[in-house]
Image: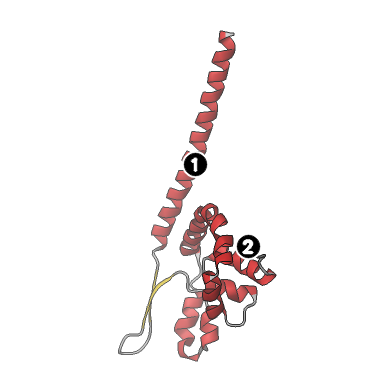
Amino acid sequence: MQPQLTEKEALFCAYYAQSGDARAAAAAAGYRNPRRSGAKLLRRPQITAALAEPAAEALPAAIERGLRALAFGSAADAVRLLLRGEELTADEVEKLDLFIVSDLKRPKGGGMEIKFFDRLKALEALSRCAGAQAQEGGSFLQALSAGARLLSEEEEDV
């Protein structure tokens, strides 16, 4: 029998299941040093066991959330980083939402180069996900219809 998780550990698990980001989950759960705490928590067997079961069910939803964030996410924090780059403290940079940023560079001549993930590709992937869900629903309806036909045929035979 595994020991119960503390309230903080359970919060970490819930946030980690949503985001997949150990540092952000530890920060949201209230740990003082989120980077170190997140890494330590993920090495604990009771935490990995608590995360393992719902992870398989949550993966398609997490993929869809990620694609939505890429397709519709705001570039405001990336622009903030571009404009205030060296003025920002490390803690302020940690809080920026840079999920849609694929690459950051500082060229030798100065300035900053920011590349974003392709929104059209994210939209196409979302469209494929929606199509797959519709097909799954369609095949389920087809199976129900086939089952109903078989039942009606059996009733006619009686």
Q: What residue would you read off at disc 2?
A: 2
Q: What residue would you read off at disc 1?
A: 134
Camera-side mark, 2 or 1: 2
- Dot 1 amino acid type: Ala
User: In front: 84, or 29?
Assistant: 29
Q: Is residue 145 above or below residue 75?
A: above
User: In front: 49, or 86?
Assistant: 49
Q: Residue furthest front?
A: 1
Q: Quadrant of the image for the C terminus?
A: top right
Q: Is residue 136 above or below residue 100?
A: above
Q: Position of residue 60 (x, y in %)?
A: 50, 53
- Residue 121 seen from this side: yes
Q: Residue furthest right?
A: 7
**Label 2: few (<14), some or many (≥20) within 10 Å?**
few
Q: Is residue 146 above or below residue 6?
A: above
User: In front: 60, or 37?
Assistant: 37
Indicate the quadrant where residue 14 lies.
bottom right
How is the rendered protein coloured? Answer: secondary structure
* Alpha carbon distance from label 2 to label 1: 40 Å
The residue sitting at 42% across, 62% down in the picture is 119
CB-based contact (under 8 Å), mark 2 and mark 1 = no
Q: Position of residue 20 (x, y in %)?
A: 52, 66
**Helix, strand, or loop for circle 2?**
loop
**Label 1: few (<14), some or many (≥20) within 10 Å?**
few
Q: Is residue 2 above or below residue 28?
A: above
Q: Residue furthest top?
A: 158
In the image: residue 117, left or right of residue 77: left
The residue sitting at 47% across, 82% down in the picture is 81
Q: Position of residue 17 (x, y in %)?
A: 56, 62
**Helix, strand, or loop for circle 1?**
helix
